Image: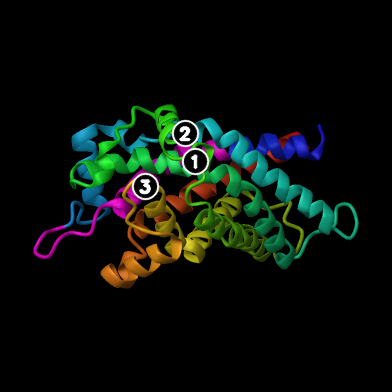
């Protein structure tokens, strides 16, 4: 099996592990990000992450925490295949000779390049996921967006294609998506490699045990969100914004208005669930990737 096929296979398995572990946390993150700003004297719909979990389970059952999982599950193979295979090909281009260990800075470049490629898959997938996750929040707010009800991932795609400008509608939020994926994946793979080398005591990381890989993967996932979280908030509000009566004119406008109305805190809505998800989800992803890649070697 060639290196590209190995990366495709290992990346897919890693992505499935990441999704199963992390999706409930992601649902809560999007609910907190998308809840409208309360009027003066009113309380927000969710007081925090724990309250959002309680209300979601009470209203929708445990399945509500996995709402919107169909879209990323359907594309996780393609997403992670692209991410890890593009990263693998960039590693091959940057190596001075076959088998050479890349520096941390080179891994940062590989991650950024992979981030550009996966943005084209992430944007429509994230739009569908965010619409499904956010609609229960918007339904209780009287927001204009609730005029559209989605029965599932394919229904979101059909409605967007029909009434929001065709294929272009599925790529709403492409700018903040790329602004998240490029620096985010640069941080992810750079920190992952740096931690592996630190734990191994040198550049040869082939002997690391599972615990070390879990630790490096989990902390690398945390680095991803620390690098790009405000961008993710902007992306989410842009993608769920009403097409006919938009609240925001673009990413910069969304950033300015969130900052003006909610302050610095507004750019970090849902940060707790995102970090709580990122550590175990990325730990599972990288461990599954490394074990599969090793088994295929």
Would you say 4 lies left or right of 230 here?
A: right
Residue 33, percent across and down?
Answer: 33, 54
**Mark 3 lies on residue:** 240
Viewer-side label of 3, 2: 2
**Mark 2 lies on residue:** 161
Residue nearest the viewer, comparing 193 with 117: 117
Q: Is mark 1 on a helix, strand or loop?
A: helix
Vertically, is 163 above or below 41? above
**Which region is colored magenta?**
15-43
Q: Which mark is residue 241?
A: none
- Quadrant of residue 287 within the rendered picture: top right
The answer to whether any part of residue 257 appears in the image is yes
Residue at (82, 35) in percent of width and height: 2
Residue 36, percent across and down?
Answer: 24, 55
**Mark 1 lies on residue:** 170
Would you say 242 lies left or right of 92 here?
A: left
Residue nearest the viewer, comparing 89 with 211: 89
Kindly report the secondary structure that dominates the magenta region of the rendered protein: helix
Viewer-side label of 2, 1: 2
Vertically, is 25 above or below 250? above
Marks 3/2 in contact by CB < 8 Å: the verdict is: no
Looking at the rendering, in which quadrant would you find the C terminus?
top right
Q: Is mark 2 on a helix, strand or loop?
A: helix
Looking at the rendering, in which quadrant would you find the N terminus?
top right
Marks 2/1 in contact by CB < 8 Å: the verdict is: yes
Asked if the stretch drawn in magenta spans residue 101, the answer is: no
Label 2, residues with CA under 10 Å away: few <14, some 14-19, many ≥20: some
- The tag earlier along the polypeptide, 2 or 1, is 2
Residue 47, percent across and down?
Answer: 19, 56
Residue nearest the viewer, comparing 78 with 148: 148
Q: Is mark 3 on a helix, strand or loop?
A: helix
């Amino acid at each position: 099996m060639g290196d590209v096929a190995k990366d495709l296979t290992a990346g897919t398995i890693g992505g499935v592990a990441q999704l199963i572990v992390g999706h409930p946390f992601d649902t809560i993150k999007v609910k907190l990000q998308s809840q409208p700003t309360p009027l003066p004297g009113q309380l927000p719909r969710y007081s925090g992450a724990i309250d959002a979990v309680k209300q979601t389970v009470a209203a929708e059952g445990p399945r509500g925490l996995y709402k919107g999982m169909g879209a990323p599950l359907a594309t996780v193979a393609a997403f992670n295949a692209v991410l890890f295979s593009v990263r693998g090909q960039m590693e091959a281009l940057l190596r001075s000779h076959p088998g050479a260990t890349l520096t941390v800075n080179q891994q940062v470049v590989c991650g950024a390049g992979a981030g550009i490629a996966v943005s084209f898959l992430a944007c429509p997938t994230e739009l569908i996921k965010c619409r499904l996750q956010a609609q229960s929040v918007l339904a209780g707010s009287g927001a204009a967006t609730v005029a559209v009800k989605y029965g599932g991932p394919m229904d979101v795609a059909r409605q967007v294609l029909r009434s929001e400008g065709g294929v272009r509608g599925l790529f709403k939020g492409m700018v903040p998506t790329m602004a998240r994926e490029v620096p985010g994946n640069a941080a992810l793979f750079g920190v992952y490699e740096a931690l592996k080398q630190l734990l191994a005591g040198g550049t040869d990381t082939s002997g690391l045990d599972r615990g070390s890989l879990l630790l490096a993967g989990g902390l690398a996932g945390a680095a991803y969100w620390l690098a790009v979280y405000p961008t993710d908030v902007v992306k989410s509000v842009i993608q769920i914004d009403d097409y006919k009566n938009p609240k925001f004119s673009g990413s910069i406008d969304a950033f300015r208005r969130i900052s003006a109305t909610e302050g610095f805190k507004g750019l970090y809505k849902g940060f707790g669930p995102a970090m709580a998800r990122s550590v175990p989800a990325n730990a599972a992803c990288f461990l599954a990737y490394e074990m599969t890649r090793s088994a295929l070697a």
